[in-house]
Amino acid sequence: MNQMLDHEGREDHRGRAIRNLRGHRALRGDCFVGSWGDQPLTRAPCGAGHHLTRNAPSSTIPTRGVARAYDRSEPVRGQRHHFQINGLMKLALIILLAGAWCSLFRVAGSQVLFEADFEKELTGQIPEGFLALDGAFVVREDKGNRVLELAGAPLSAYSILFGPPVSHNMSVTARVLGKNKGRRCPAFAVGLLGAGGYRLQVSPGRKELELFKADKRMANAPFDWQPGKWLWLRLAVTRVKEGEWQVRGKVWGEDASEPGTWAVRFSDTSEPRPGRALVLGCPIAGTPIWYDNLKVEETSPEQK
């Protein structure tokens, strides 16, 4: 084994040390791989009397091994670049992981896909992006608050679409106000997946909260409606496992907190088709129905 000397003149036990990267003499039988400034130090035979140069001719890696050496008192520039690159890679990895965590958090919680309170909409017109399937829907202002109004006549069932097309793991929320006239009361609802999808309907004439799939009633619960007061409605469609979806609904008063449980629900084994959210109304009393604070949210199966 060729004997080598370190930069202090001591023998290196590996037998292939080199003094430093500043052109010091290397002994016979070893080579060097490294960099110096912006130019690489290529591999070259290092016999007696040879020096490391910036432009040494390239050669294959020797069978006797490759020596890596540096001046311990001052790191070479190539190493500084190496440290800087490592730092940038670590920063990029941290940013990537943070983005993935935020995405996971959004999935575990909820994401608002559409929201409307009509405060910036022009009165007397249908809001931009809304599609009335039937009925006279326009924006009205009452005591400084703008709402979406369904006219009290003619007597029929009407609906208006809004928001993006959705299929499942979605919910729609709206605030609704209706008034009676004598013993006649309006009926109103929120829906998902278009006109042929699901709807949560308040039916004061029957004193019930009802859940429909298209025109078929799937679930119902007793409900005592208070005329002339704002009421929150929320409908959700959630995939709970392969081939099964939960359709659930709840209502609560404007001054009350949202209940933690659902008032009505049913399971569906037919895969929902994408469709837009909607609000519906039937002005049986001949009085307008008002809608406000519409919201479509993407939810997760974990949300109960």
Image (cartoon, rainbow, N blue to C red):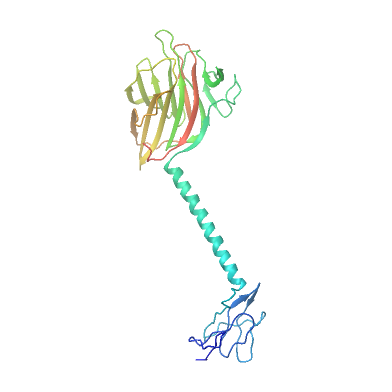
Between 157 and 238, the residue placed more toward the observer is 238
Residue 277 at x, y = what percent? 48, 30
For image coordinates 49% across by 15% down, the residue present is 288
Asked if one can make out residue 275 in the rendered structure from this viewpoint, the answer is no
User: Is residue 26 found left or right of 160 in the rendered image?
Assistant: right
User: Is residue 87 found left or right of 271 in the rendered image?
Assistant: right
In this rendering, the count of numbered labels is: 0
User: Is residue 35 found left or right of 99 in the rendered image?
Assistant: right
Q: Which image quarter: residue 241?
A: top left
Q: Which image quarter: residue 89?
A: bottom right
**Relative to 11, does residue 128 appear above or below in the rendering?**
above
Question: In this view, which residue lies farthest toward the right?
Answer: 55
For image coordinates 52% across by 84% down, the residue present is 65
Dividing the image into 4 quarters, which one contains the C terminus? top left
Between 296 and 91, the residue placed more toward the observer is 91
Between 250 and 18, the residue placed more toward the observer is 18
Question: In this view, which residue lies farthest toward the top?
Answer: 182
Residue 132 at x, y = what percent? 53, 24
**Relative to 92, does residue 231 appear above or below in the rendering?**
above
Between 274 and 69, the residue placed more toward the observer is 69
Residue 30 at x, y = what percent? 56, 87
Asked if one can make out residue 277 in the rendered structure from this viewpoint, the answer is yes
Residue 236 at x, y = what percent? 40, 33
